[in-house]
Amino acid sequence: MGKEEGSATEAEGESERKGVERFSISVEPELVREFDSLLEKLGQNRSKAIQQAMRLFLSEHYWAEGEGECAGAVVVVYDHSARLAEEELTDLQHDFRDAINSVLHIHVDERNCLEIIAVRGRIGRVKGLIESLEKGKGVKQIKHTIVSIK
Ligand code: NI
């Protein structure tokens, strides 16, 4: 039992903490072994790892559904020598100013520019910005790291 529920010390500590709910789940033994072995390497406990996984699961669901608010960074690499690339990118950023907090521009080399666009706003708007950037002239790469905010 101790193995399934975590150590006695951990269990006591948690039930003492306010606002914590304990629950048990059924998991394939193979998955538990793999999970525990990684946690041991990372020096993390199950509760913290499961909470992180739950938050990630929720965040990905909200992102996929386009529900709620989010914040993060969108990184765009584009060729500034492409015709109208800069004008288009600026127009686009003005259109999405409600979702953009700030922009950091880096001149990577003779032709390429990198912009880090800090975003904060409705998920739908941030997704709209990313989709529009993908169609942008001279745009070579886009990556984003976004978290949902409740
Ligand atoms: Ni530049």
Image (cartoon, rainbow, N blue to C red):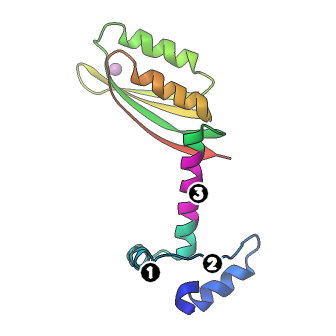
Where is residue 111, by image quadrant?
A: top left
- Check if mark 3's residue and mark 2's residue have beta carbons within 8 Å: no
Where is residue 110, by image quadrant?
A: top left
Task: Classify residue 137 as left or right of residue 44.
Answer: left
Give the label on residue 24, or none: 2
| Residue 104, position as x, y percentages in the image | 45, 29
Q: Amino acid at mark 3?
A: Arg
Q: Earlier in the sequence, mark 1 or mark 2?
A: 2
- Residue wearing tag 1: 29
Task: Classify residue 20 as left or right of residue 2.
Answer: right
Q: Residue at x 29, y 11 (%)?
A: 82
Helix, strand or loop at label 3? It is: helix
Q: Is mark 3 within 8 Å of ligand 1?
A: no
For the residue carrying disc 2, how many other residues have a C-alpha within 10 Å: few (<14), some (14-19), or many (20+)? Answer: few
Give the label on residue 55, or none: 3
Q: Earlier in the sequence, mark 3 or mark 2?
A: 2
Q: Residue at x 68, y 87 (%)?
A: 12
Question: Start and end of the magenta stretch?
Answer: 51-61
Q: Amino acid at mark 1?
A: Pro
Considering the image in quadrants, where does the N terminus appear?
bottom right
For the residue carrying disc 1, how many other residues have a C-alpha within 10 Å: few (<14), some (14-19), or many (20+)? Answer: few
Q: Residue at x 60, y 31 (%)?
A: 124
